[in-house]
Amino acid sequence: MSLTRRGWLQGAAWGVGIAGGVIAARRRRLRVLVLGGTRFVGRAIVAAVLARGHAVSLFNRGRTGPGLFPEAEELLGDREGDLAALRGRSWDVVIDTSGTNPQWVRRASELLHAAAGRYLYVSSTAAYTMSGSLRRSEESPIWPAATDAARTYGERKAAGEREVLRYFAGRATIVRPADLFGPHDYDRRAHFVRWALRARAGGEFLVLGRPENKVAFTDVRDLGAWIAGLIERDVRGVFNVAGPPFTLGALAAAAIAVGGPATPVWVDRRWAAAEGVDRKQLSAGTGSTYEMGSPLAVVRGLCFRPLVATMRDTLEWWDSPKGEAAGEAAGETPGMTAEAEAEVIAAWRASGGGSG
Ligand SMILES: NC(=O)c1ccc[n+]([C@@H]2O[C@H](COP(=O)([O-])OP(=O)(O)OC[C@H]3O[C@@H](n4cnc5c(N)ncnc54)[C@H](OP(=O)(O)O)[C@@H]3O)[C@@H](O)[C@H]2O)c1
């Protein structure tokens, strides 16, 4: 089929009109139920879905970000047991961003499978089983059902996927993100914004790893925009979202571009682990990470903004006035102190590190 013809068909399906010389596409307005939606990942998805003109109902306890989206309907309840606000209603799509417990996912899927057309579940790359290789594709095995009640996060996400597929077989979209970053990241701010803050402080900053090490994360707003498009196009299936291919060296360069001149000191991860350096106190990307990328998602329209834009916007968010939710004093660099970092760098050099 020619491009023109395909474009015409797409236009017909989506209702294209020409007004004042501008082609305006009228999308079918979807009724979208978002389970969660007011903290970080869900927030970015809701913002994107609303921006595209869809009708959104938010279901949560009303504790996190109440009134954040005045244009959305707020339905109050608790995934732990009170789903009354969802009864007797219907939606085109459910987007589950808060499904961290498989029982929550089962209750929602069971209740909604006849009342909703489709279910998009935000899972995680943690759903994949560990193996010797860091490579993963959507076909790689996920954690099997655990007999032990104390499931890990990855096992719970894998179990959540199975619940969705049980009730929405053929009508499910499973999205498995690796690390997500960007503005409003209250949980993991110690990891990402720290890059720009350390560069802004000037001097030397510690990075665990080598400049060529691959890292895999995605701006949460790119995920949100892509998911909004997926539900419009009714795309089903399983998708990894593990960023564009870039490196720790690129991250450090973006931090310097945004924060100002500073010098990364590359410290061997194994040496640091043996010395008891807590990598969780350092910037994102300094742990090992899966090598998977997002090829299927890219084919289905996922786009990535430049890394430096995520860095800049996250720093701007960090510097902006925030409510109590931020939980830390403005200006404070989260994670390891600069003094502790300098001690690690000195010990690394004393051990002969970085000299060869
Ligand atoms: N951050 C990452 O790098 C990353 C990577 C991969 C996957 N993920 C996935 O992304 C999701 C986390 O995203 P997020 O927390 O930023 O999502 P979010 O949807 O923005 O925030 C969590 C939402 O869940 C609601 N909630 C919490 N407990 C609830 C309950 N008992 N009943 C009803 N609603 C409840 C909260 O509102 P109330 O408090 O008002 O109830 C809030 O709206 C998880 O599913 C995680 O597995 C994250």
Image (tube, rainbow, N blue to C red):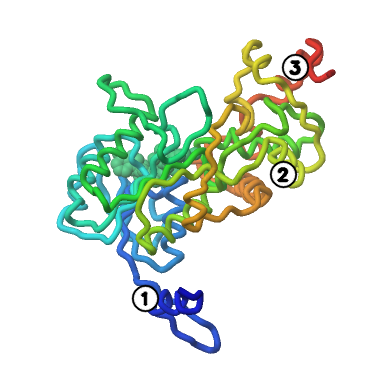
The residue under label 2 is 254
**What is the secondary structure assignment of the residue under circle 3?**
helix
Say which label, 2 or 3, has the lower sequence index: 2
Q: Is residue 63 left or right of residue 305?
A: left
Q: Type of residue at label 2?
A: Ala
The answer for how far apart the CA atoms under marks 3 and 1 are is 62 Å
Residue type at numbered disc 3: Glu
Circle 3 packing at 10 Å, graded few (<14), some (14-19), many (20+), is few
- Residue at 44% from the left image edge and 84% from the top image edge: 17
Q: Looking at the image, tell me whether mark 3 or mark 1 is earlier in sequence order.
A: 1
Q: Is residue 87 left or right of residue 356?
A: left
Q: Residues within 10 Å of mark 1 (few under 14, many from 20)?
A: few
The residue identified by callout 1 is: 13
Ligand 1 image position (quadrant): top left
Q: Measuring 25% from the left and 21% from the top, which residue is drawn there?
A: 147
What amino acid is at disc 1?
Answer: Ala
Q: Position of residue 3 (x, y in %)?
A: 51, 74
Towards the viewer: 316 or 130 = 130
